[in-house]
Image (tube, rainbow, N blue to C red):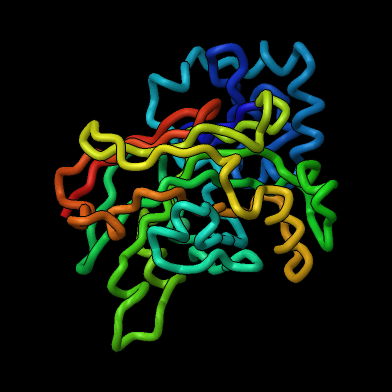
Amino acid sequence: MRAVNHDGRAGLVIGDEIVDVERGSAGRFGSDPQALYDRWDEVREWAATAGAVVAGRTGVRPGDVRLAAPVPSPRQVFAIGLNYRAHAQEAGIEEPPAPMVFTKFPTCIGAPSGEIALPPGSVDYEAELVVVIGRRAERVAASEAWGHVAGLTVGQDISERALQTSRPHPPQYSLAKSHPAFGPIGPVVVSPDEFDDPGDLAIGCSLNGEEMQAARTGDMIFDVPALVAYLSSVVTLLPGDLIFTGTPSGVGYARRPRRLLESGDQLVTWVEGIGEMRHRIVP
Ligand code: ZN
């Protein structure tokens, strides 16, 4: 199943068309894209029926419209640092023995296209696979973890490196990564069953057409099941929560010379089997 946020309304992509969930289900499910994840299992059952397709057809193709964030207001947003071996190396930090966890505050979640405004400082890109939780998870074993995942989407963990790392501040990971629009996601949430192997997908991003990051999610130090197991050993994960799973090597701050985001840059971010996000960097 492929879920989108079209004009603030929950939609499913069926064939190459967006089906409106509320209209298609004659009101059984509401229009709120965030609430879709509270009833994900029921929505999946419903979407498998022929009636779902006919009644809610919009005639709109997902590539022809500006979609909003498919998970617009998650209650919790987790993010993982240093989760690819090559990225830990370029950051000059040893591989952590457990996932390094911080948050992106939920107001930073943004649309999969449009503008990202630069605050003062050193703003960098981080292409990431983002996990969307589909079932409440408390102390879930890794072997059961995929069953609690609604789907996967593309994300950028945009980061302001001065606040994140430098003196005289204490390191402010969560604040430095939570400016408005610093957490764009989308364009679609794809359920795990749609992939041949949801654990090994090509991921990357480009700036003005030049490839900056290119890797596979199979190179993660802690894979998706390990992250769900680790996080849910402490925190209760709720439907519609997000996990930014870490970025591969090639971030601008680690390049020599550094390549930070500049006004006018075109940032394209992709994950295999999901799609791409396109953003313009503005002052
Ligand atoms: Zn990150």
Q: Position of residue 211 (x, y in %)?
A: 30, 35
Q: Position of residue 204 (x, y in %)?
A: 41, 38
Task: Using the image as rendered, state which of residue 236 and residue 11 is in the foreground.
Answer: 236
Residue at position x 82%, y 61% in the image? 138
Task: Using the image as rendered, state which of residue 119 and residue 97 is in the foreground.
Answer: 97
Residue 85 placement, left or right of 184: right
Task: Using the image as rendered, state which of residue 265 and residue 96 is in the foreground.
Answer: 96
Whether residue 8 appears in this view of the structure is: no
Residue 71 placement, left or right of 267: right
Above or below: residue 253 compared with residue 270: below
Q: Residue furthest bottom?
A: 168
Task: Using the image as rendered, state which of residue 281 and residue 208 is in the foreground.
Answer: 208
Residue 180 placement, left or right of 187: left
Q: Quadrant of residue 241?
A: bottom right
Residue at position x 75%, y 32% in the image? 43
Residue at position x 55%, y 20% in the image? 18
Residue at position x 84%, y 47% in the image? 143
Q: Quadrant of residue 20?
A: top right
- Give the tally of numbered discs: 0
Above or below: residue 220 compared with residue 102: above
Q: Position of residue 191 (x, y in %)?
A: 68, 32
In the rendered image, which quarter contains the C terminus?
bottom left
Whether residue 234 appears in this view of the structure is: yes
In the rendered image, which quarter contains the N terminus?
top right
Q: Position of residue 44 (x, y in %)?
A: 76, 29
